[in-house]
Amino acid sequence: MAELGIPLPKEIPVMTLPGSVLFPQAVMPLYIFETRYRQMLNDVLINNRLFAVVGLDISQSTKSDQFEPPHDTGTVGIIRVCHKNQDGTSNLVLQGLIRIQVNRIVQENPYRIIDISPLESSHGVEEEELDRKMKKLSKLLLDKQEMGGKVAKEIMQQLLKVKEPEAFVDLAAYAFCSNPLIKQKILSTLSVTDRFEIYFEELETELKKLKLSKRYSLLDEEDISFN
């Protein structure tokens, strides 16, 4: 975050949200209505406009007495736009800045604050190989779009303008991956190469399901026509 001129604090407020995964550079709209988060928002707006979003670790919620157990990995974001409503709620837009490791929970009241460490990605392969992976991911997403999968055309057009492999796979996962567990796995993976491979596997599985669904639909149409 040095390029933004914003120092990353060691301790930071956090929203622990079920099924939510924020990636660096991605933009997340949020509706703030809980009392604890209203106070958190007031505090961060007069400070540095930073807070973290960390997913709720459902696998631990039944094994631990801890309130809202967080995943080990999350993202610090900065508030880009905030609109306060007359009823005290707020609508805001948070842009992800950096992956972080959740070291420990510092406090719970009046809202949760966590101790964090920044996480750095590793590429692991030559730039040409990452370019090939970007092209493969683009093709898989376009195939999904053609087969009726949920791939918004406008967002896809914007994604294809992204030239940096790490940002490309992160933004693709954020926008088009519907499985929060896979999204969290991609977020928690520091190797950019491995992130591509995780998403390849997920998309290939989705494409197989779409093909089967389409095949069954055609068979049903044939049965109707014969009857």
Image: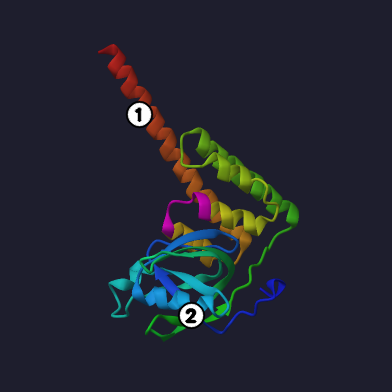
Q: Residues within 10 Å of mark 2 (few under 14, many from 20)?
A: some
Q: In which quadrant is the C terminus drawn?
A: top left
* Outermost residue, left side: 227
CB under 8 Å between discs 1 and 2: no
Residue underneath mark 1: 216
**Residue tagged 2:** 43
Mark 1: few/some/many CA within 10 Å (<14, 14-19, 20+): few
The residue located at (46%, 39%) in the rendering is 149
Q: Check disc 1 and give the amino acid type.
A: Tyr
Q: Is residue 68 above or below residue 206?
A: below
Percent across and percent down for residue 75 are: 53, 69
Front residue of 24 and 71: 24
Q: Secondary structure at mark 2?
A: helix
In screen coordinates, is 11 left or right of 37? right
The answer to whether residue 30 is magenta is no
Foreground label between 1 and 2? 2
Q: Is residue 201 above or below residue 41?
A: above
- Residue situated in front as seen by the camera: 1 or 83: 83
Q: Residue at x 28, y 17 (%)?
A: 224
Percent across and percent down for residue 54 are: 45, 70
User: Relative to the observer, which residue lies in front, 43 or 27?
Assistant: 43
Q: Is residue 97 left or right of residue 53?
A: right
Q: Is residue 196 visible?
A: no
Find numbered disc 1 in the image and state the secondary structure of the residue it sits on. helix
Residues at marks 1 and 2, CA–CA distance in whole angstroms = 54 Å
Residue range corresponding to the magenta coloring: 174-180
For the N terminus, give its image quadrant. Answer: bottom right
Write the residue at 52% across / 33% down.
Answer: 146
- Please name the residue shown 47% across and 82% down the image: 114
